[in-house]
Amino acid sequence: MRSLFKVVLLLSLPYATFLPFPEAQAKVPSQTCVTLSDSDLGYVNWYPPNPLPVSVATDAVGRRLAKLEAIAASPSSLNLTIERELTQWLFEKPDLGGADIGSRARMHGLLKVLPNNQKPKLVAIFDQLALRIEKLPSPSLRAEMTGKLASYYQKLQGNERAAQFLNRAITKTLNSTDKQVRAVQLTKLLDAVVELKLSKAIAPQLPQIERALQSSTPSVSLARAFADNNQSQKALKLADRFAKATKAEKIVNSDLITLYLQLNKLELANQNLKRISPANDAAYGRLVAAYDRAKQTKLADKLFKDGFDSFFDTVKNDAFLDGYLKAGGNPDRLFTGVPVLQAVGVIDLRGDYSLRAAGEYRRLNQPQKAQRVIAEFVQLAAANNLVIDDILMAAITDGNQQEAKAAFQQLLEKGAFVKVEPPINFATQINALDQIAPFIKRASKNNERRIELLQSLALAYAKQQQANKAVSIAEQIPRRSPEYSTAIDTLAQVAAVFGKSGQKTEATTIFAKALSLSSNIKELDTRAMAYTAIARAYTDAGDTSAAETTRQAAVKLALSLPNDPNLSVNANYMLSLISQQFLNANQVEAAWKMLQEIPKDAYKNTNTSNLISTALALGNLSIAQQAVDLEYTDGRLSLFPEEAFKLASSYIGRNRQKEAIKLLDQAADVMNKQLKPEPSYLISIVRLYAQAGRIDAARQMLSKLPSSYTGLRQELQQYIDCHQKA
């Protein structure tokens, strides 16, 4: 089975990370070359295969959807890279301790910001991803990914769609003629079924699944599925088989003990409890909840505290508490059962978990407790100035919108939003912007933050198609700085919202207002920046002609400034600043055009590194190449190798070795003229030359690596030899 999270990175520009491979031999072992090849294939720099359209490049959600579409359509030659990337999309990364603190799955972040009108598109992408996952080489990983994809189907379309997807996957697996692969995949799919509480949906297939797994290692998930379908005797028999198959020195799966408790076998549960290790994950949370339901309060107290071994382990603790509550755990524990940790003290979960607990109390038909917890949350939020927008939005995701709305209403009645930052996203979700608007208009002693809130409010009204309110608020926004009109920038963004939604009349009217205000600005630099903001917004709205006209107006204003290098604001500075503004919006073509307006003798003072990185991220290798060429011809050779390596890696990932080699030859020429070339650059160019098939050049550059790098020289020699064999 391929590990989900331990992946070796063999090329990271400009610095390289290495494994301690055996010393180089005259003939490199084939297994070593297979390992090196797999590592290379796991990090192909392939995306995006073509330049992203401006409408996608400038849209954060659109970029993520485009990446998933590209993954779904990717060729089998990219399998190992796709395995790695889908792992990041579908799975949480566990906290391994130290600096590696873990992370959420990327899909989790996408679902948090996905507009409702984009959900059908994401479901269609899921359908394509399901087919792509079937082409991956690892049977175990295919099944795990299918299970995780089912969980996202469930979040978007409910139990029926997830069950349909899993049933189809199980049917296909049952038809497999490879018994070993079939057993591995069925076990992983069953794990997903019981995790998503869909056991009843696969009940007709359970007998066939049992027969298919009869000669395999017993599966606790199969036993759980039978128990969920009220087939207690069969579940108990399978559970006992699983317990006996687990060697005495091995840690027992905590779900086995949970299952024994579900089957009212307390004695068996307690016997196996001695063989588990406390963990702060969802399975351990389910175990604690099972002991709660079995009315084993003291033991549940101990287990709950054992599961809370690290306050800082946020990803895992969330999973532990989530598993506990979903399994019917007692919400009281969130406020009375949390341990005191050394050097931390009492962990206060009220901020993050009060509304979750209130929802659980409602489902348990304990309304008084629910009301008390909400009141305590309101009191805490009002007194501690919590950032409640995220908390209220999370409550909606968790199915606790009723509790979130109650808390919001109580905060309003208390006048808490005078001190507490009003929750714009939540208010937008429940159509309550008018209720918080008065607080935002006089909110925050920090002028910068007040400006941001007013901008967010104006855009929120625009997304609700309330043009008059959006414009009125935008016009009230003060300047962020003397040379930057935030009001005009916000008006332009409001206009873009209407333009993208097809409300062309409103968009035209608001753009005209922004242009009129801009034309009345006396300061040339401020007016140039205002036109830049409008040009960016025209691009967002899809009006490329108006965007170019307005950009040209900004160019004209910038060029009319003095070109005295002793002035803090001169023509070249403004052109460079405007270029960066376009770059910040991922409008790389406009940014490159702005840089080209700068006289060639002033190029040395411009920063093309950001432009190259952005162009590569958006798949625009043409602009990246022009910018790298500029660095080379302009003599900025200290920067050139690093940028050349980035672009060469992108070319190699797209099978454009000829262009990569030309760049590497230029970088080699620069480095050969240096007395002491940077070792990290030498390491990178050796690897890239080898990947591009220039073995002779790779060996020549390797010879320049200082003799003190003995181990790395041996590893690089093996790397070159393997590519020569390939």
Image (spheres, helix red, strand yellow):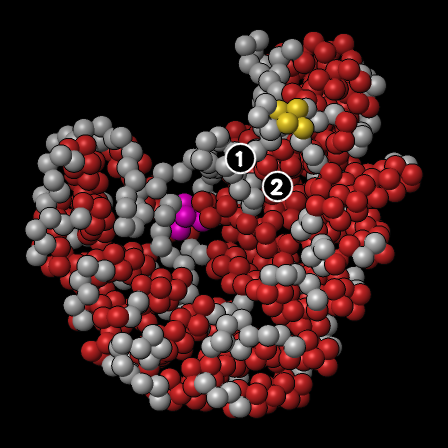
Amino acid bearing label 1: Pro
Q: Which mark is residue 329?
A: none
- Find numbered disc 2 in the image and state the secondary structure of the residue it sits on: helix
- Give the quadrant of residue 490: bottom right
Q: Is residue 676 visible?
A: yes
Residue at x-position 80% and y-position 53%: 411
Q: Secondary structure at mark 1?
A: loop
In the image, residue 653 above or below residue 214: below
Q: Are marks 2 and 1 in contact (CB under 8 Å)?
A: no
Q: Quadrant of residue 548?
A: bottom left
Looking at the rendering, the stretch of residues picked out in magenta corresponds to: 78-82
Locate the C terminus by quadrant: top left
Q: Residue at x 77, y 40 (%)?
A: 354
* Depth order, front residue of 216/271: 271
Report whether 24 appears left or right of 305. left
Which amino acid, by three-letter code, is at mark 2? Answer: Gly
The image shows residue 621 at horizontal and vertical percentages of 33, 67
Where is residue 719 drawn, in percent x and y? 21, 40
Q: Earlier in the sequence, mark 2 or mark 1?
A: 1
The answer to whether 595 appears left or right of 662 in the picture is: right
> Which residue is nearer to you in this view: 665 or 395?
395
Q: Residues within 10 Å of mark 2 (few under 14, many from 20)?
A: many
Give the x, y percent position of residue 387. 67, 51
Q: Is residue 496 left or right of residue 75?
A: right
In screen coordinates, is 189 left or right of 579? Answer: right
Q: Which mark is residue 147?
A: 2
Res. 94 mark = 1
Mark 2 and mark 1: span between their CA atoms? Answer: 18 Å
| In the rendered image, the vertical position of residue 64 relative to residue 533, given as above or below | above
